[in-house]
């Protein structure tokens, strides 16, 4: 995964910035149809940035997030990339 520069954005408190797993455009610029984007969605993601109060997760960690539909996540475009913001408690584990 190509690294994006998020130095102009840092989440507050216990928030984590992650790539949007349902993005319809790949890193290489290919647009995916709705069905393909849904099938390629994952809940194992690399942490792009962490808030200053996060204790369990660090930037660059690969995390397993809560896969249940309706989990609190804020989807936004940051630095030209579709991202989600979640709270640290939504991380079920860190892959080592």
Image (cartoon, rainbow, N blue to C red):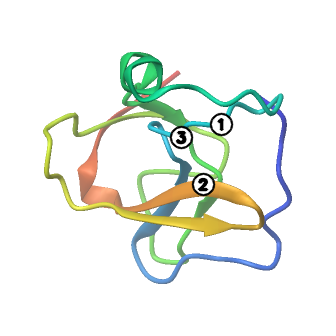
Residue located at (82% from left, 72% from top): 7
| Residue sitting farthest toward the front | 33
Q: Are marks 1 and 2 in contact (CB under 8 Å)?
A: yes
Which numbered circle lies on residue 23? 3
Residue 19: horizontal and vertical position, in percent? 57, 46
Residue located at (65% from left, 77% from top): 10
Specify the quadrant that holds the N terminus: top right
How many circles with numbers are drawn on the protein?
Answer: 3
Label 3: state its secondary structure: loop
Read off the residue under disc 1.
25
Residue 51: horizontal and vertical position, in percent? 53, 73
Q: Are marks 3 and 2 in contact (CB under 8 Å)?
A: yes
Q: Are marks 1 and 3 in contact (CB under 8 Å)?
A: yes
Which numbered circle lies on residue 82? 2
**Against 51, is 66 above or below?**
above
Label 1: state its secondary structure: loop
Give the left or right position of residue 44, taking residue 7 as reference.
Answer: left
């Amino acid at each position: 995964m190509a690294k994006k520069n998020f130095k102009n954005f840092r989440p507050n408190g216990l928030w984590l910035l992650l790539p949007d797993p349902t993005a319809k455009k790949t890193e290489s610029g290919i647009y995916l149809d709705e069905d393909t984007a849904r099938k390629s969605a994952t809940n194992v993601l690399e942490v792009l940035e962490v808030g200053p109060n996060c204790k369990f997760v660090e930037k660059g960690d690969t995390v397993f997030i809560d896969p249940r539909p309706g989990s609190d996540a804020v989807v936004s475009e940051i630095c030209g990339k579709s991202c989600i913001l979640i709270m640290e408690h939504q991380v079920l584990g860190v892959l080592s």
